[in-house]
Amino acid sequence: ERSVSPSSSTDDVSASDQKTCLSSRFPNHCLQYVHSIPGNDRCVDCRAIDPEWASVTYGALLCLKCSGRHRSLGVSTSFVRSIYMDHWSHNEILSMMEGGNSQLLHFFGRHNFSSNFSTKRYRTRAALFYRENLALHVSRVAVFGKYKGRNMARKPKRNEISERSRKC
């Protein structure tokens, strides 16, 4: 297993790190990064603390109980992995680093899917749109070769664009 020094950047995953991530345990520095993403301290569905499972498809963290519900949806709807017990591919790790519970909950909120909507919301066209676009985004990020953080491959928000144009 790779040791991580305190000076290691979680935003800077090199090509050699990516090769060790082809099918290995979730790297500690990547796990620290995933846990630092807003909302990832709780299960995306029931809000239980310290989730140890993940829906790779949505880049979201889940508790054990909700991971079972997601498994029952089928792998084409929600591909579930244990953060500590399973092996992870590079793209699966990127999906977790680019996703996030708050991001998914915000998306569902914009589509009026409350948490009471439970797992039904994962079988909607909106959820299909989310998982297809997250997968597309992850494939584009993987092409960069070196992970440089969540903001590197994201489009600037409208207010950021207007601020940039004022500075020019």
Image (cartoon, helix red, strand yellow):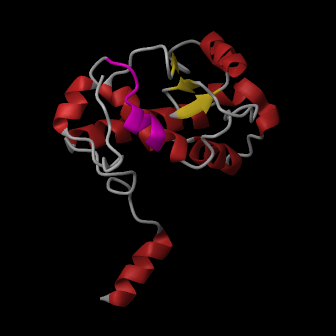
Q: Quadrant of the C terminus?
A: bottom left
Q: Is residue 161 left or right of residue 5?
A: right
32 magenta-colored: yes
Q: Position of residue 33 (x, y in %)?
A: 45, 43
Residue at 45 percent of width and 35 percent of height: 31
Residue range of the region highlighted in magenta in the rendering: 24-33
Asked if residue 134 can be seen in this view, the reply is no
Q: Position of residue 47 (x, y in %)?
A: 74, 36
Residue 141: image quadrant is top left
**Residue 69, relative to residue 134: is it above or below?**
above
Residue at 37 percent of width and 80 percent of height: 164
How many marks on residues?
A: 0
Q: Quadrant of the N terminus?
A: top left
Residue in front for this viewpoint, 138 or 1: 1
The main secondary structure of the magenta stretch is helix
26 magenta-colored: yes
Residue 78: image quadrant is top right
Residue at 62 percent of width and 47 percent of height: 102
Q: Position of residue 138 (x, y in %)?
A: 35, 38
Residue 142: image quadrant is top left
Q: Residue reaching furthest right?
A: 116
**Residue 36, relative to residue 157: is it above or below?**
above
Asked if residue 140 can be seen in this view, the reply is yes
Q: Position of residue 60 (x, y in %)?
A: 56, 34
Q: Is residue 21 left or right of residue 105?
A: left
Q: Is residue 75 left or right of residue 143?
A: right
